[in-house]
Amino acid sequence: MEPRSLAASQADAAKPSVQERLTRVRADLFSSPDRAQAAIHELKAILALDPRSAEGHLLLGIAYRSVGSADLMGETVAEFRQALALNPDFVPARFYLANIYLELGRPARAREELEAALTKAPGQPQFLALLGEAERQLGNPRRSVEANRQALQADQSFAQARYYLGLALLDLKQPAEAIAELERVVQSGPKMIDAYLGLGAAYLEAGRVDDALKTLLEGSGIDPSRPEIRINLSRAYRSKGLLDKAEEQLKFSMPEQSVTQASPVFQQVQSDFYLEQGLVRLARGQLDAAAAAFQKVLNIDANHGPANRHLAEVYLRQGFYTLAFEHATRAEKLGFPLPEDQRKLLQEKLHKKDLGADK
């Protein structure tokens, strides 16, 4: 019996500890994301032995997210929350949770997590940059600029902070400053499709359509499946009057569900797609098709200013003056009034209608 007991003891001693297993899983997960399913299996086994391991729950959440399935989003959030329940001071869990909240279009929750993390790790550049992006998505671009500049003070080479800074400057209608920041990101490498997308959009805002086309085409080479790239390419081609090329881009860009069907991020891409589709149809004089596309935007967001304005323009051209007035009024309240010549024409048509001399 003694030799067997000794052998069993030696076997137990040879088994890796929970921490050693976590270390191995962490290395695998970050070096080979394609091994996420194997990591999930191992982490569940580890947590069966030590269910109070905050690190284990964090890594399981990261593994779930690495799979890329919308069905696992709930499990991802639950694991990050469990890690924080076990250790409220575990700031990496707050950082990953904030990322997920931004992906789900919940920037207010992301901001809460990041502000809590920064009380434990003040001045941490990654937390500051992500907080800046949360503020931008909440409609506070000046706060975003401030947070990202703080992050860059700590690390001038931090490309993500510079990218978020460029987006915030673009929101502040400062395209020249945004372009300067985003060009630095694109030139610094490695190639990030979001940087090309942001720079292309900034060039469009500045009226530099040829530069936008060049940048967006380079971006489409990195990931041709990204609908945002195709939508902006369509916008650039439309700006040059190349409607066939604009329409061709839209054939590749119909957005598919990436997170959840109700995700605000997904809905924003859908909205941008239908708006651009409507503008191409309007440029072709296809008024019924244009109206249908703009209405799809309004089905997503009834207070979409540009969609209301362009739908008013369509109705004006079709002779539906009451409908045109309704949408023009809403668009103006939202800060997107009809051009002055169209406003005068609509007023004249409505006046004639009141007199019974027109539709």
Image: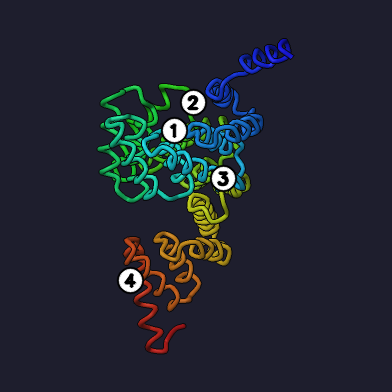
> Along the line of sight, which residue is nearer the eye, 290 or 164?
164
User: Does 290 appear above or below 68?
Assistant: below
Tag 2 near tag 1, CB within 8 Å = yes
Q: Read off the residue under disc 1.
A: 195
Task: Give the CA separation, mark 2 to mark 1.
Answer: 8 Å
Disc number placed over residue 75 in the picture, else none: 3
Q: Read off the residue under disc 2.
A: 191
Tag 4 near tag 2, CB within 8 Å = no
**Amino acid identity at mark 3:** Glu
Q: Residues within 10 Å of mark 1 (few under 14, many from 20)?
A: many
Mark 2 vs mark 3: which is more N-terminal? 3
Numbered disc in front, either 1 or 4: 1
Task: Give the CA separation, mark 3 to mark 1.
Answer: 30 Å
Q: Read off the residue under disc 4.
A: 344
Numbered disc in front, either 3 or 1: 3
**Amino acid identity at mark 1:** Ala
User: Does 329 appear above or below 216?
Assistant: below
Q: Residues within 10 Å of mark 2 (few under 14, many from 20)?
A: some
> Along the line of sight, which residue is nearer the eye, 328 or 333?
333
Say which element carries label 1: helix
Mark 1 vs mark 4: which is more N-terminal? 1
Compared across the picture, whether 39 is left or right of 354 comes to right
